[in-house]
Image (cartoon, rainbow, N blue to C red):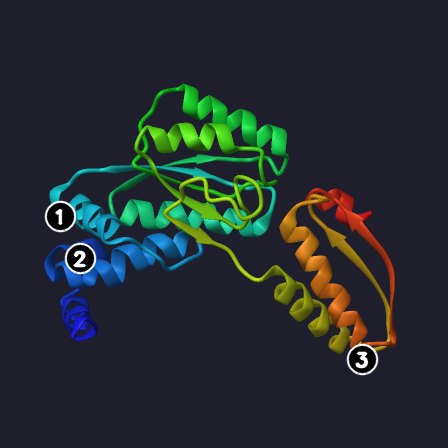
């Protein structure tokens, strides 16, 4: 029913925002929260957050979002930033983006500056570079009433819930194994390989490397020459 209603509005040449205004709460669940969480890589939302989004679009209230990125030097981080801003503009959400710089100390300093500014954010999405480095400022934002969307890694200690609404991540072991297996197949299952990773010691990097090693067991004709940690530096990866 929702899809048929949306198709009818589209045929009238209406903008997406106008469609949402006319289609009502059903389309909001399908559109606003699907779009918002698509920007941060997931698909889970509470009933209250859906209602808040619906109210913002239909009442004209602008929601304030803080988007704390991993590091804009990384292409996939650029895509997340741009997608978040796109959906924010579409659904009346003002996005404040922080570039984590791909360095834990830089990310922490910039987040602390944002927190100390006193600006109120309705919600914030954060992708920590390393676990257990941003717990204090994150808890301060939550204490002020901001809803927290955790991305990729635990903000606190591994497995610790610091108070997030939802945790958007993936199986990094499977990701490492799948990617390595694809590349090994492309070179015919024989030859040499090197692996470049991001920040040494972070759980996503550790798990991706586990996946690579699992793939290697299935390709005895591949020799792994070295594993390098480059902190996501393009220049270091090239060398």
Picture coordinates of residue 47, whole percent (x, y) = 23, 54
Q: Secondary structure at mark 1?
A: helix
Residue 108 left/right relative to 6: right
Would you call the spot at circle 1 few (<14 residues within 10 Å), some (14-19), or many (20 or more)? some
Q: Which residue is mark 1?
A: 58
Residue 64 left/right relative to 79: left
Q: CA distance from mark 2 to mark 3?
A: 50 Å
From this view, report whether residue 239 is shown above or below residue 64. below
Q: Secondary structure at mark 2?
A: helix
The residue shown at (43%, 25%) is 114
Q: CA distance from mark 2 to mark 1?
A: 8 Å
Q: Which residue is mark 3?
A: 188
From this view, report whether residue 169 is shown above or below residue 118. below
The residue shown at (47%, 22%) is 113
Q: How many marks?
A: 3
The residue shown at (33%, 50%) is 87
Q: Which residue is mark 2?
A: 20
| First-in-chain label (2 vs 1) | 2
Residue 74 left/right relative to 23: right
| First-in-chain label (2 vs 3) | 2
Answer yes or no: do the residues labelled 2 and 1 have beta carbons within 8 Å?
yes
């Amino acid at each position: 029913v929702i899809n048929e209603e949306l198709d009818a509005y589209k045929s009238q040449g209406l903008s997406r925002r106008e469609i949402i205004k006319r289609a009502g709460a059903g389309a909001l669940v399908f559109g606003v929260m699907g779009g918002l969480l698509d920007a941060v890589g997931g698909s889970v939302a509470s009933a209250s957050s859906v209602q808040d989004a619906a109210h913002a679009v239909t009442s004209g209230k602008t929601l304030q979002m803080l988007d704390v990125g991993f590091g804009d030097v990384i292409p996939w981080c650029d895509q997340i930033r741009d997608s978040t801003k796109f959906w924010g503009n579409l659904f009346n959400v003002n996005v404040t983006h922080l570039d984590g710089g791909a360095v834990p100390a830089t990310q922490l300093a910039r987040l602390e500056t944002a927190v100390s500014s006193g600006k109120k954010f309705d919600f914030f999405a954060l992708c920590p570079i390393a676990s257990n480095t941003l717990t204090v400022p994150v808890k301060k934002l939550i204490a002020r009433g901001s809803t927290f969307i955790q991305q990729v890694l635990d903000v606190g200690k591994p497995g610790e819930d610091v108070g997030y609404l939802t945790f958007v991540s993936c199986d990094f072991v499977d990701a490492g194994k799948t990617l390595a297996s694809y590349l090994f197949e492309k070179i015919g299952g024989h030859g040499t390989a090197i692996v470049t990773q991001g920040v040494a010691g972070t759980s996503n990097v550790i798990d991706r490397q586990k996946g690579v090693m699992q793939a290697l067991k299935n390709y005895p004709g591949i020799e792994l020459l070295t594993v390098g940690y480059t902190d996501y530096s393009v220049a270091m990866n090239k060398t």
